[in-house]
Amino acid sequence: MAALHLSSMFFPTQISSVAPSRKKVQSSCATQAAPLASRASAITGLRLPTAGKKRVAVSTNAAWNPFAKSTVAAASVDGTGYPAGKLTIFTSKGSRAQIIEWYAVEKGLEFESVSVNMRNGDHKKKPFTNVNPFGKMPAVQAADGTPVFESGAILLYLAGLAGELKSPEDYATAAKWILYANATYWTAAEKTHAAPPDQLDALNALLSDRPFLLGEEFSVSDVALGSYLYYTKAFFGEKFGKHPNVSKYLTRLMEMKSFKATCGAS
């Protein structure tokens, strides 16, 4: 698979007008929240999209990247679609899009949030179905127009953009935690409306000597697992009382400015 160097990717400020309303809005992970731009305005150090300001380059020094540049855009045959030129994250109330925004904000990726009105069924028709033909959230459109859907796939894509995946081993490490969070942990938690004790035992032991899953550095793996630990707490009232290392880990994540600006805002 060919290597990709992303040092020349820019996201221009101005784009052409389209039918859907393009606003920097979003809701919290569990409940509706204020617009992202409004919530983050008081938070220093976060590089959020700001109208009227020049967008900065997203670059990486990664020597390896699993994402080959694609010229496939989300536009349909009749020309209906969202304009390319910047990373676009589609969001709606009660969706998992805030997981994606959390990682993008923390890594300083420039993006625009587009609110899709699911109550009106906008997610089941064009132009959104050009991005995700199954009409589900979350979904993103890459700067070159490539549509990406499914939260795990999106996180892997953004990790590639952020330069976190410098080798096939980095990719495998991120993928295993993303797949675990989605397919193993959350599947079990949803079934019983509680965190699976045996899995918490293993996580508690793993986190006994490190602040984050992979060690000293925050990574996309923490977003993948941390978001579902947060869901377990928010939706099912999990206290993690018997697993202090997991509890401290989740508290550490929830205290991040990027988390408070996205998932934690209410």
Image (cartoon, rainbow, N blue to C red):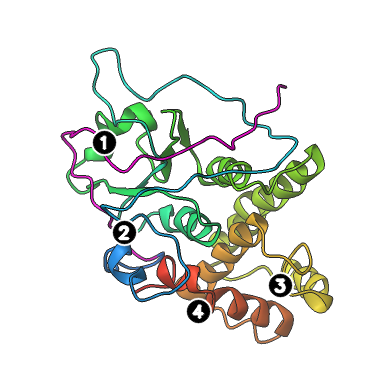
Sequence order check, earlier mark of 1 and 4 = 1
Task: Name the quadrant containing residue 8.
Answer: top right
Which SS class for mark 3?
A: helix
The secondary structure making up most of the magenta span is loop
The residue furthest front is 54
User: Which residue is tagged 1?
Assistant: 15
Badge 1, how many Cα within 10 Å: few under 14, some, many 20+?
few
Q: Position of residue 232 (x, y in %)?
A: 54, 70
Give how far apart the Cα atoms at labels 3 and 1 are.
49 Å
Which SS class for mark 4?
A: loop
Residue toward you, 159 or 32: 159
Amino acid type of the residue tagged 4 in the rendering: Gly
Residue for point 68% across, 49% down = 164
Residue toward you, 74 or 59: 59
Give how far apart the Cα atoms at labels 2 and 1 are.
20 Å
9 magenta-colored: yes
User: Which residue is tagged 4?
Assistant: 237
Amino acid type of the residue tagged 1 in the rendering: Ile
Location of the C terminus (image quadrant):
bottom left
Sequence order check, earlier mark of 2 and 4 = 2
Sequence order check, earlier mark of 3 and 1 = 1
Q: Which mark is residue 26?
A: 2
Amino acid type of the residue tagged 3 in the rendering: Pro
